[in-house]
Image: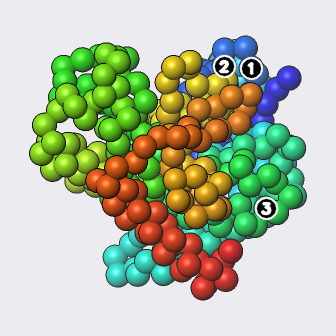
Amino acid sequence: MTVKVTVTGAAGQIGYALLFRVASGQLLGPDIPVKLSLLEIPQAVKAAEGTAMELDDCAFPLLQGIEISDDPAKAFDGASVALLVGARPRTKGMERGDLLEANGGIFGPQGRAINEHAADDIRVLVVGNPANTNALIAQSAAPDVPAERFTAMTRLDHNRALSQLAAKLNVPVAEIRKMTIWGNHSATQYPDLFHAEVGGKIAAEQVEQEWLRDTFIPTVAKRGAAIIEARGASSAASAANAAIDHVHDWVNGTPEGDWTSAAIPSDGSYGVPEGLISSFPVVSRNGRWEIIQGLEIDAFSRERIDASVNELVEERDAVRALGLI
Ligand code: NAD
Ligand code: LMR
């Protein structure tokens, strides 16, 4: 059966890197036909039409159709996967409250449209920043959709952490297991090497503690800013790649003996307040994310997880005060 995948911000940078991979079967699998729905603001509909022409020109066997709209009700109608990429970037002079409010104006209506029009099996991945809190806004506007269907992306941070560690230890990324990103997709995130394994041994024991604390953690946490500095634009192909990884694993399951990172609604595990959309070590089984339980958290990790979770609490309180959730 054909699966409808809605991508917001379809004419943007990430959209351009994402749509072709969805249409080629990399999102859901090589046997699943897809129909793409592109949601854009009116000024960018023409550019989305251009991307749709290019998608046509690829003659992807799995692509069963492309719709373009500036109306969330139409764009999410019957959708089983929603990739919420379009967001309001922070511009000069904009305070954090202004940014949250502007994004509330996007993710609230999109959440409502998902609630009213999406398919019963809808799965939502929020990529647009601030991703965790935008996901919370969309979720709270969709009371009829199970809360667990709203997730935010920390897979890019996870992949960055794998790559940095592999380079440090001079091993292939495939040798690394059980990497975790905790908390917010922001500079406070905590990439955790105390549970990650390389060649079956704990990664933190194979690197100098100074490198872990003073190089690894800040490099991963500030990689987004470093890309913006180098490229003059935020990460796009790597962000699209991570979105593909996240949804692919959510739908098809994570490999045995490993886990990944995703920001999902907290059930209170590891002291993260219930309902916050925070990154955890997770596996996907039968199409559902499950938080890995029972990990020991030492004082070093506790302090860093708490710092990032506290930032999420502040963001939640700010959008609550603005009446957005
Ligand atoms: P971009 O500016 O190139 O594209 C954004 C697109 O969204 C634009 O085409 C714009 O017209 C569209 N848009 C804006 N409001 C919309 C709305 N209400 N409905 C539909 N479309 C709308 O930006 P980009 O580089 O593609 O990045 C998109 C977002 O992803 C940004 O918020 C960026 O910070 C974020 N991001 C997140 C991660 C992550 O790891 N979570 C990584 C990279 C980028
Ligand atoms: C990233 O991690 O690359 C982005 O979230 C950075 C950004 O602010 O867009």
Q: Is residue 150 left or right of residue 245?
A: right
In the rendered image, which quarter is residue 143 located in? bottom right
Judging depth in this view, the residue of 195 and 33 nearest the camera is 195
Mark 1 residue type? Ile
Asked if disc 3 and disc 2 are in contact, CB closer than 8 Å, the reply is no
Locate the N terminus and report the quarter of the image it occupies: top right
- Residue under numbered circle 2: 29
Report the residue that reaches farthest toward the bottom. 321
Q: Position of residue 180 (x, y in %)?
A: 42, 40
Mark 2 residue type? Gly
Q: Position of residue 85 (x, y in %)?
A: 56, 51
- Residue under numbered circle 3: 142
| Distance of label 3 from label 1 (alpha carbons) | 27 Å
Note whether 235 is above or below 109 in the view shown.
Answer: above
Judging depth in this view, the residue of 82 and 51 nearest the camera is 82
- Residue under numbered circle 1: 32
Asked if disc 1 and disc 2 are in contact, CB closer than 8 Å, the reply is yes
